[in-house]
Image (cartoon, helix red, strand yellow):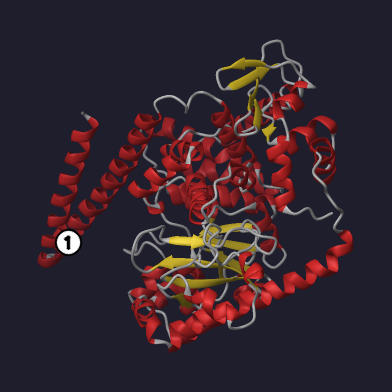
Amino acid sequence: MGIPESIIQQIVTKIDFLELVGQYTSLQRMGDRYRGLCPFHQEKTPSFYVQPDKRLFYCFGCGKGGNVFQFLMEIEHLSFPEAVQRLAEKTGVRIDLYDEKSIERGKRQDALLQLLKRVAGSFHYILTHSPKGETALQYLRKRGLEDTIISKFQLGYAPPDPFWLKRFLETKNFSSEFLVESGLFTHRNPDRAFFVDRIMFPIHSAQGDVVAFGGRILSGEGPKYLNSAESALFKKGEILYGFYQAREEIRKTRTVVVAEGYMDVIALHQAGVGIAVAPLGTALTPAQVRLLKRFADRAILFFDQDEAGLGAMRKAAILCEQQELEPYAVQAEEYPYKDPADFVQNGQRGELQKIVKYPIPILEFLLKKTSVKKDSTSRQRNLLKVEDLFPYIESMVSEVRREAAITQIADFLELDRESIRKDFQRKQWIAAARRENQEEKKTETIQRTPELVLMILAMESRKNFEDIRSRIAIEDLEDPRGRELFITLEEMYREEEWSIDRVLQGISDKGLKEFVLSKLVSLEFKMNQERLLNDSVLFLKRRNLEKERQQVLKAIQRCEKTNQSEELFRLLEKKMYLDGELEKLRAVENE
């Protein structure tokens, strides 16, 4: 049964959420929220909350939460179509079964694929053959990209005129009604293109169909990268950029390189590494890893070498191990280039090929990030490092690999192997007992970061998001979960719609979804929003300035050793500028 989104929204608007929940538990008003005993588990103290204005529920005891459909599905053990049907009857919304219309849907889907294919061709033509695309083409060539690679990935350019695309497509006999559904135009103004003055990256399905676009801003304001909104054709958690181009080479070599973004993938292919792919602005997902496992046995992770990159690498490695896709890492820290695109731009294709050709197992890479000294203090620190690696060891399907990993850790950190193994087993037993005794409780604690604070404040109101996006860019966010939420919120903002439900549906991480739900129904983010927002923005700006200052100091030390006086002078000026900016921030913080 296919149910139009418009029908679902009608039901959500008409349903009396409080009345529905009140049939299963007694609710008491607490400000703008309602509280009661949870209908999903036994409890004596109420921990179940309903936020009627957002049509959300959440239990702080068992972690269950969601919207009106999820409540009914959980309480009555219904499928989604059954829950929609039940609530449609309750609200008087007429709903039809759409199975008999599947052929018509298929025709419309084919037509949409043809439209996206034509648009991708038009973007590519403008980039490569039109004066309008000259600036964008020169930018790509300065980044080291050749015409063959631009053609291979069908890169394009969306001109600054926001209305040209509608005019162009209407001359090709596409109806206005059909174009509204395409995702190529903003919701509030269906004549205005979604992508304006951006370098365009067509996103292909595994079969080679263009199903969406990514766009990099060339000038003006807005997020650096922007993706098409999700649709029936495009689920960003299931598609990998570059997979269609790399598929056969991955199958032949049984190896894949997982990078972080569009330009990294293209740069690797430009350097002759034709097995590179990347997730679409989010962390790697289980669905993407399952796709890779069908074609590969090894995954080489090529992420940034900073703390955020290492955190993303650990999570990706765990996903790979769970699917028995053996994870490796590149060793790029000795080079002054932060990503594959920098290697290519600086003419270092050979070096890029070399570090990809000789990766090291991920465990060895993570261990090398620890410092090993002979004093007792560092031994204590190494014991803590071991515990950080336990989730990765636990993700290994093979018992033999687990034992080998424990031996490797013990040897590297100069700790007793048997002690590590016992600690690991004890952690497993404790975790198993906790799961058994608190089966319905959340299994993962989400660390509260400034990025997540800002994104939850943004979800509270469109006005908050306008304020946040005017003061920070996506590049300022280190937490990948915060980046993922920012992208979804930015897409909604540009489409001029605001739906918390849509944000929640886009969160694949169960723990993160529960965390966000719990904050949205709590009072924590309702009080002093302006101060909380300002403090979080200032923290991010100060952290990023301090990080950049540390990088400049390291570069100054290198220049002093090599007597590069001109570069040294430039770096000292930059340090003075950063010191000034930090001083300004401190003054604001102390006000």
Q: State which quadrant residue 416 falls in.
A: top right
For residue 50, above or below residue 580: above
State the image coordinates of residue 41 (x, y, percent, origin top left): 76, 21
- Image quarter (top left, top right, bottom left or bottom right) of the C terminus: top left
- Image quarter (top left, top right, bottom left or bottom right) of the N terminus: bottom right
Pointer 1: what residue?
559
Looking at this view, name the residue that lies furthest to the right.
Answer: 100
Q: Nearer the viewer, residue 105 or 562?
A: 105
For residue 587, above or below residue 398: above
State the image coordinates of residue 70 (x, y, percent, origin top left): 74, 37
Q: Is residue 275 left or right of residue 438?
A: left
For residue 578, above or below residue 22: below
Q: State which quadrant residue 205 falls in.
A: bottom right
Q: Nearer the viewer, residue 468 or 548?
A: 468
Looking at this view, name the residue that lies furthest to the bottom.
Answer: 129
State the image coordinates of residue 287 (x, y, percent, origin top left): 68, 55
What secondary structure is marked by label 1? helix
Q: Is residue 303 left or right of residue 443?
A: left
Q: What residue appears at the point 10 percent right and 61 percent down from the top-left corner? A: 569
Q: Is residue 351 left or right of residue 568?
A: right
Q: Nearer the viewer, residue 257 or 286?
A: 286
- Within 10 angstroms of label 1, few (less than 14), some, or many (20 or more) residues? some
Residue type for callout 1:
Cys
Residue 260 visible in the picture: no
How many dots with numbers? 1
Residue 44 visible in the picture: yes
For residue 91, above or below residue 112: above
State the image coordinates of residue 558 (x, y, percent, origin top left): 20, 59
